[in-house]
Image: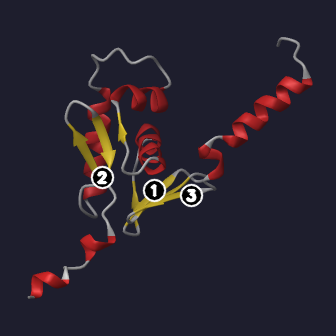
């Protein structure tokens, strides 16, 4: 509703386009999990996951930051967009539900880092194959 300069609008649009979530395309993938950003649908091992809007946002946050520890404050700010008071168990409840739905079709991917936060732990390709030294 305020008057604005066209150059400022242009600068803001350019800033939005530089953000990582804009460059990732229309889908996010990690391990055997796929999230379609257009349809807001997620799958694990080809099975459709019945996620709430917050669970989908939480999943996308983890998919955008694989193997990175995400603090509760960062998660709350990114998914809920509010100041985190530190007292609520909202994050734990949503992560528990998201884990339950993901683990119905495969091993745990969201790991807890005690005192630090949570991490989407992507299995390395070596985890899929037994090492050759174990046969010796």
- Nearer-the-camera pick, 81 or 51: 81
Mark 2 secondary-structure assignment: helix
> Residue 6: x, y in percent?
91, 25
Which residue occupies 78% across, 34% down?
Answer: 13
Quarter holding the N terminus is top right
Mark 3 secondary-structure assignment: strand
116 on left or right of 30: left
69 on left or right of 40: left
Which residue occupies 28% across, 73% down?
Answer: 126
First in sequence, mark 1 or 3: give its number. Answer: 3
Res 104 quadrant in image = bottom left
Residue 10 is labelled as: none
Res 129 quadrant in image = bottom left
Which-is-in-front pick, marks 1 and 3? 3
14 on left or right of 75: right
Quarter holding the C terminus is bottom left
Which residue occupies 27% across, 34% down?
Answer: 93
Residue 42 is labelled as: 1
> Residue 91: x, y in percent?
32, 31
Residue 47 position (above or below residue 88) = below
Q: CA distance from mark 2 to mark 3?
A: 19 Å
Residue 100 position (above or below residue 70) = below
Q: Which residue is mark 2?
A: 101
Mark 1 secondary-structure assignment: strand
- The crowding category of the residue bearing disc 1, from other C-alpha atoms within 10 Å (few below 14, some 14 to 19, many at least 20), is many
First in sequence, mark 2 or 3: give its number. Answer: 3
Residue 27 is labelled as: 3
């Amino acid at each position: 509703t305020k008057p604005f300069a066209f150059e400022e609008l242009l600068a803001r649009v350019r800033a939005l386009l530089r953000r990582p979530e804009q460059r990732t395309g229309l889908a996010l993938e990690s391990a055997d999990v796929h999230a379609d950003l257009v349809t807001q649908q997620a799958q694990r091992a080809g099975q459709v996951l019945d996620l709430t809007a917050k669970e989908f946002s939480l999943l996308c946050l983890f998919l955008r930051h694989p193997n990175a520890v995400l603090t509760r404050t960062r998660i709350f700010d990114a998914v809920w967009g509010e100041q985190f008071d530190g007292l609520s168990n909202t994050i734990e409840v949503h992560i528990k539900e998201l884990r339950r739905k993901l683990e119905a079709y495969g091993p745990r991917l969201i790991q807890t880092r005690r005192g630090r936060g949570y991490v989407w732990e992507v299995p390395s390709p070596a985890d899929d194959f037994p090492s050759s030294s174990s046969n010796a």
